[in-house]
Amino acid sequence: MTQKVAVAGVDFNNPLIAASGTFGFGREYGEFYPLSVLGGISCKGTTIRERPGNPPPRVTETPGGMLNAVGLQNPGVEHFIQHDLPWLRRQKTKIIANVAGNAPEDYCATVEQLNDTPVHMIELNISCPNVKQGGVQFGTTAEGVYGITSEVRRHCKKPLLVKLSPNVTDISEMAVAAEHAGADAVSLINTLTGMRIDINTRRPILHNNTGGLSGPAVLPVALRMVWQAAQKVKIPIVGLGGISTWQDAVEMLLAGATALQIGTVLFTDPYAPLKIEAGLEAYMAQNGISSLSELTGGVRPW
């Protein structure tokens, strides 16, 4: 009985990957347990230069989740390579570098710096505004997805995982565009756009006015989108969005995911990945499942 999965030629000891932006570069969580218990870590979104992020307040709770508008605060790719990557290498888990930018050349320059490093995979965050196109996000049209993915593909030597935005009309079109542009896999979903308002000040609670909604509330949307994308693409899907329990994980695999990312639940329960892994093990034993990959896409629609 094995929980090992493979995504785009990268072998993970189990399907549980810490989602970008929820795990930093792993140092804080490394105080709770050895990070080798995770299949992998998708590191904090990294840009070509250091970014301070948005002014606070930039995080708030919502029913069934949270909103964030952190704004990709990060120390920049050179700092990541020099200071974080050497430590991550010693953790004996797969390392996914999450790359973001505001112009195609930013993405490409960041990826080129990562090409000759020990990261195992690049995850492309295309939920970023394209400053050359009036601030429209790269990931909200099929043309935008194809354009940025194909551009980065020409510069990227690593397996390329494209993280899709759910703020679109048809997620399967975006997945197909990424596949046709050379993506080795897709991850979905990124956060949904949301808002909360302080009824006393009448101002949005987040200084950015809107933010990304994540947590258990988005799970049904994520499941639906993973299922839709799985009908249209042949490349592997990494499913994420609201996974908090082993039951959620099984649902996501059945919807069509090969591997999973765990995010917001880590803020309330850092041990969630260990509990999910144990639950998957028990579920496999009870149902005579020898390999977790047997579950992928196993949903039986009416």
Image (cartoon, rainbow, N blue to C red):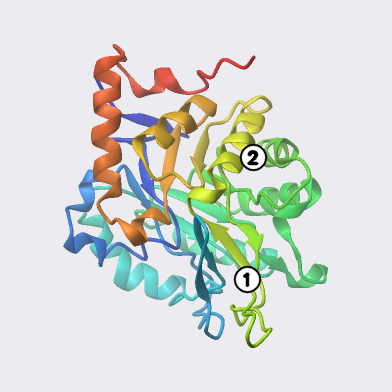
Point out the frontmost of discs 2 and 1: 1
Q: Residue at x 37, y 68 (%)?
A: 81
Q: For numbered disc 2, what is the local secondary structure?
A: loop
Residue 173 pos. (x, y %): 75, 38
Q: Label 1's element?
A: loop
Q: Which residue is mark 2?
A: 182
Instruction: State the residue at coordinates (51%, 47%).
Output: 241
Q: Is residue 9 visible?
A: no
The residue located at (67%, 70%) in the rendering is 102
Task: Identify the residue position indicated by label 1 in the image.
Answer: 196
Q: Residues within 10 Å of mark 1 (few under 14, many from 20)?
A: some
Image quarter of residue 192: bottom right
Q: Position of residue 148 (x, y in %)?
A: 70, 54
Locate the N terminus by quadrant.
top left
Reading the chain from its start, which is encountered first: label 2 or label 1? 2
In the image: residue 19, left or right of residue 14: right
- Rendered image quadrant of residue 11: top left
